């Protein structure tokens, strides 16, 4: 027999709102530390931060309430990875919940529009309950339904076996927390959500899986479709469900439980009636198979593999650590740009609240308790003028602005047509060291640097490779080395020396093998490439990919120094003369960029800059979106994160 609410849901075609159900996880973490070690103090810029410190020994992770379970898991993985990174060297995150010190609650919020549509459909005309009472009644129905499902939920999600393979069970005074309503702190009479306590999944680094969360959402909607429990029988039904669940928790996790066949079959019939997405179907079929094959439950798997907690802790913790300690990427968000990942690491560490507004476009909202900012690609903020973005994007326009401000730039010209460029080469450039590059910023791509004056053929090749949408710049090559300055709020926070992509021989390996060896130690964004440019450079140096270099012999794969074309980077932040920092800040100021990366060719980084000494320094590029990841991955020198400086700049100014 269907209940009244479900009949209205069917009549008004409201089941589609199931996908608007929001879900989140509140997880308490007590790391295991050596006796002489302490948990680092966690920053707290927002009371809604993903990671918050609740005591000297415990942290709490609270994900936002989202309608996509996979995103909830991603937030957990990211937060736990930063907790793990902050722990002392021998610190560990336990995977079991002995004493319930490490536990989690799944918070489920039904769509508000569901209550609104149902209340409107009732057409009470002033004779029914008020809206808050009505929505509370629906939450009461779902709560009672979940309590009747406690034996099934315990069987599926009691993941932590104690001695003899039995699952943990809360103390009698904590049993009510297994399923409980959560009141709105601003309106205590109003139910805000439901909390369901489930054990940590020791096979998932996040402690939960997307399948678990999808199944719990469907369990709520299934409960919403079932007949209401008569009030006189409610207490007895609750006690019976608790007793059955406790019996399952205390039993052999590999033994079948016959009483669970009926509820899982009933849910299967209901799901077939309402329809399933592929993700929800996968989640249900996984849980259904565990009812049929108890050895496949989480508790069953752990009990079969390990005889007690001590035996299981180390190998399972090692698996979790492998997932949470990715050297290059932020777990859960590895498909974001490197900039966005570097920013998120600093955001989590700094205790800010954050929301991923658009994963594909790398749009993030970061908030403290008093401010909020939207950032694109980790570094583009509302403080960057749109006009400055456009000017900086086009090298020729930026050069004119810099020159007008009295700053040193390379002499050169812009060409949009080959005949004019060819004529200028024959009349002027043919016997000079030059740089040929796209007029629009290209992150090092299609840039050719000719220390030895190019032949007519070489110049033609470089011009046509660089001639994209906005023409080509041909400039006089500056003497010296390229240095990459990151400016945030009129302050230089990082200086990197750049060298063109290269390998150094060891007398044994071929160039191809040396490239593979070097790439094995490099992040993806800075891989050396075996492309047409590399082959052309090798030919100029009279070698091939199969050449075995002498020990110490250096061969270049590119003519221009740029990290994104495989160049080397060395941190020289504390070595360079401070006058060049002032020059970099002046360049950013001239283009009205509060945040920027400035590339300057410098003859000698230790000699103070003097404007009257021509050629001592030349500004060759200003980028409004600096690379936040680069300073964390130098080939030599100290690695450091500059994203915290960006957050300090954004949130310290009103």
Image (cartoon, grey):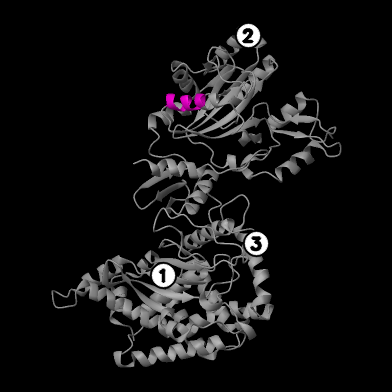
**Is 512 left or right of 572, judged from the image as shown?**
right
Disc 3 designates what residue? 90
The image shows residue 371, relative to residue 198, as above or below, that is above
Residue at the image position 52 percent from the left and 69 percent from the top: 211
Marker count (numbered): 3
Q: Is residue 87 magenta?
A: no
Closest to the observer: 258 or 93?
93
Residue 48 is situated, as x and y percent measured from the top left of the image, at: 40, 58
Residue 15, above or below 63: below
> In the figure, 615 relative to 289: above or below?
above
* Span of residues in magenta: 582-591
Q: Main secondary structure of the magenta part?
A: helix
Earlier sequence position, callout 2 versus callout 3: 3
Q: Is residue 587 magenta?
A: yes
Secondary structure type for disc 1 = strand
Question: In whole angstroms, how far apart are the C-alphas of marks 1 and 3?
Answer: 32 Å
Alpha carbon separation for disc pair 1 and 2: 72 Å
Residue 468 visible (yes or no): no
**Residue reaching furthest to the top:** 427
Query: x%, y% of residue 625?
Result: 49, 36
Mark 3 Cα within 10 Å, few/some/many (few <14, many 20+)?
few
Percent coordinates x, y for residue 227 in the rendering: 34, 85
- Check the image and report above or below for 26 versus 262: above
Q: Which residue is mark 2?
A: 426
Disc on the earlier residue, 1 or 2 = 1
């Amino acid at each position: 027999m269907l209940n009244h609410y479900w009949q209205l849901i069917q009549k008004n075609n409201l089941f589609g709102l199931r996908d608007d159900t929001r879900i989140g996880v509140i997880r308490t973490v007590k790391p295991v530390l050596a006796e002489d070690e302490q948990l680092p103090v966690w920053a707290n810029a927002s009371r809604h931060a993903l990671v918050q410190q609740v005591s000297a020994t415990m942290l709490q992770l609270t994900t936002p309430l989202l309608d996509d379970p996979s995103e909830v898991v991603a937030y957990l993985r990211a937060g736990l990875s930063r907790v793990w990174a902050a722990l002392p060297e021998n610190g560990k995150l336990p995977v079991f919940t002995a004493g319930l010190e490490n536990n989690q609650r799944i918070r489920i919020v039904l769509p508000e529009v569901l209550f609104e549509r149902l209340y409107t459909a009732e057409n009470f005309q002033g004779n029914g309950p008020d809206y808050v009472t009505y929505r509370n009644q629906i939450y009461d129905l779902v709560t009672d339904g979940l309590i009747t499902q406690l034996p099934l939920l315990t069987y599926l999600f009691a993941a932590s076996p104690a001695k003899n393979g039995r699952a943990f069970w809360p103390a009698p005074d904590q049993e009510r927390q297994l399923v409980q309503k959560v009141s709105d702190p601003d309106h205590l009479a109003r139910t805000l959500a439901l909390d369901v306590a489930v054990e940590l999944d020791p096979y998932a680094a996040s402690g939960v899986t997307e399948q678990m969360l999808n199944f719990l959402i469907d369990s709520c909607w299934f409960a919403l479709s079932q007949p209401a429990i008569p009030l006189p029988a409610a207490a007895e039904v609750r006690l019976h469900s608790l007793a059955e669940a406790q019996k399952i928790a205390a039993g052999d996790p590999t033994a079948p439980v016959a009483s669970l066949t009926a509820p899982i079959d009933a849910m299967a019939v209901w799901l077939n009636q309402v329809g399933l997405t592929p993700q929800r179907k996968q989640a249900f079929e996984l849980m259904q198979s565990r009812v049929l094959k108890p050895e496949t439950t989480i508790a069953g798997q752990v009990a079969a593999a390990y005889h007690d907690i001590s035996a299981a802790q180390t190998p399972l913790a090692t698996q979790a650590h492998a997932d949470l300690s990715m050297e290059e990427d932020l777990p859960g968000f590895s498909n974001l740009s490197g900039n966005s990942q570097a920013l998120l690491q600093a955001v989590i560490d700094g205790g800010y609240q954050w929301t991923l507004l658009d994963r594909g476009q790398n749009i993030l909202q970061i908030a403290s308790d008093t401010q909020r900012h939207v950032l694109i690609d980790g570094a583009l903020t509302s403080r960057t003028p749109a006009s400055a973005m456009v000017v900086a994007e086009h090298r020729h326009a930026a050069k004119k602005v810099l020159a007008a401000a009295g700053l040193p730039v390379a002499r050169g010209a812009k060409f949009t047509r080959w005949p004019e460029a060819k004529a200028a080469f024959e009349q002027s450039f043919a016997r000079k060291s030059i740089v040929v590059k796209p007029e629009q910023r290209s992150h090092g791509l299609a840039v050719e640097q000719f220390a030895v004056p190019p032949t007519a053929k070489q110049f033609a090749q470089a011009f046509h490779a660089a001639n994209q949408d906005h023409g080509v710049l041909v400039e006089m090559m500056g003497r010296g080395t390229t240095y990459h300055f990151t400016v945030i709020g009129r302050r230089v926070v990082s200086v990197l020396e750049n060298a063109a992509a290269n390998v150094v021989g060891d007398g044994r390996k071929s160039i191809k093998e040396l490239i593979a060896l070097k790439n094995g130690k490099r992040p993806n964004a800075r891989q050396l490439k075996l492309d047409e440019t590399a082959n052309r450079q090798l030919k100029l140096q009279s070698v091939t990919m199969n050449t075995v270099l002498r020990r110490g012999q250096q061969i270049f794969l590119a003519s221009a120094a740029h990290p994104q074309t495989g160049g080397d980077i060395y941190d020289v932040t504390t070595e360079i003369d401070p006058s060049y920092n002032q020059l970099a800040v002046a360049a950013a100021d001239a283009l009205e960029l509060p945040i920027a990366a400035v590339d300057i060719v410098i003859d000698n980084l230790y000699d103070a800059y003097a404007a009257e000494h021509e050629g001592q320094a030349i500004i060759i590029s200003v980028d409004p979106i600096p690379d936040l990841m680069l300073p964390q991955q130098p080939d030599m020198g100290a690695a450091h994160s500059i994203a915290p400086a960006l957050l300090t700049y954004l949130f310290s100014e009103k």
